[in-house]
Amino acid sequence: MMPATAAAAGPKLLGAAPSLTVPNVLRAANFYRDVLGFQSDSADEWFAILSRDGFSVLLWHGVAAPNGSWDACFWVDDVDALHLELVGRGAVIQRPPETMPYGMREMTARDGDEHILAFLQHVGS
């Protein structure tokens, strides 16, 4: 179940707990910090925890095998504002914001290890 949205001054992530396998944890942690705007809570060459807006993403050392589907999904309160922020930070946007017939406004981006990150906003059906 998706959490209810709340009004905010800027784009706000509302919920998720992804855990991603990456070949280089420190490089991936730097990408999440510098390009996606996360804060590094802890990081070493084997494991990192990064956070933004009250939730965490976990990065583990290993080999990622992207398969074309979403690797992580984040609910946000303003996908268009988040899109502008991420573009300004140099993120690779795979698919810009689009309203879907099932009541979600969605965009996808790729991280530095080619994971597909989906950002979703409930806009009604």
Image: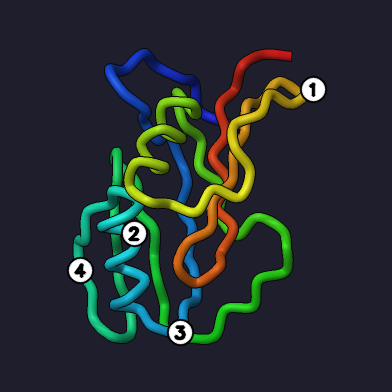
Residue extending furthest toward the right: 101
Residue that label 2 marks: 32
Look at the numbered discs 3 and 4 and tell me whether their residues touch, using CB distance below 8 Å: no
**Mark 2 → mark 3, Cα distance in angstroms:** 14 Å
**Mark 1 → mark 2, Cα distance in angstroms:** 30 Å
Residue at image coords 34%, 41%: 88
Query: Disc 1 marks which amino acid?
Result: Pro
Residue that label 1 marks: 101
**In what element is the residue under mark 1?**
loop
Mark 2 residue crowding within 10 angstroms, few (<14) / some (14–19) / many (20+): many
Q: Nearer the viewer, residue 80 or 39?
A: 80
Where, by quadrant of the figure, is residue 124 drawn? top right
**Mark 1 → mark 3, Cα distance in angstroms:** 36 Å
Q: Is residue 33 left or right of residue 108?
A: left
Residue at image coords 49%, 86%: 62
Counting residues from the start of the chain, the first of labels 2 and 3 encountered is 3
Numbered circle sitting on residue 42: 4
Residue at image coords 74%, 26%: 100
Counting residues from the start of the chain, the first of labels 3 and 4 encountered is 3
Residue 41 against residue 21 in the figure, above or below:
above
Query: Disc 4 marks which amino acid?
Result: Ser
Residue 80 against residue 47 in the figure, above or below:
above
Nearer the viewer's eye, disc 4 or disc 2? 2
Counting residues from the start of the chain, the first of labels 4 and 2 encountered is 2
Q: Report the number of discs.
A: 4
Query: Disc 2 marks which amino acid?
Result: Tyr
Query: Disc 3 marks which amino acid?
Result: Pro
Residue that label 3 marks: 23
Nearer the viewer's eye, disc 3 or disc 4? 3
Quadrant where the N terminus sits is top right
- The image shows residue 17 at horizontal and vertical percentages of 46, 53
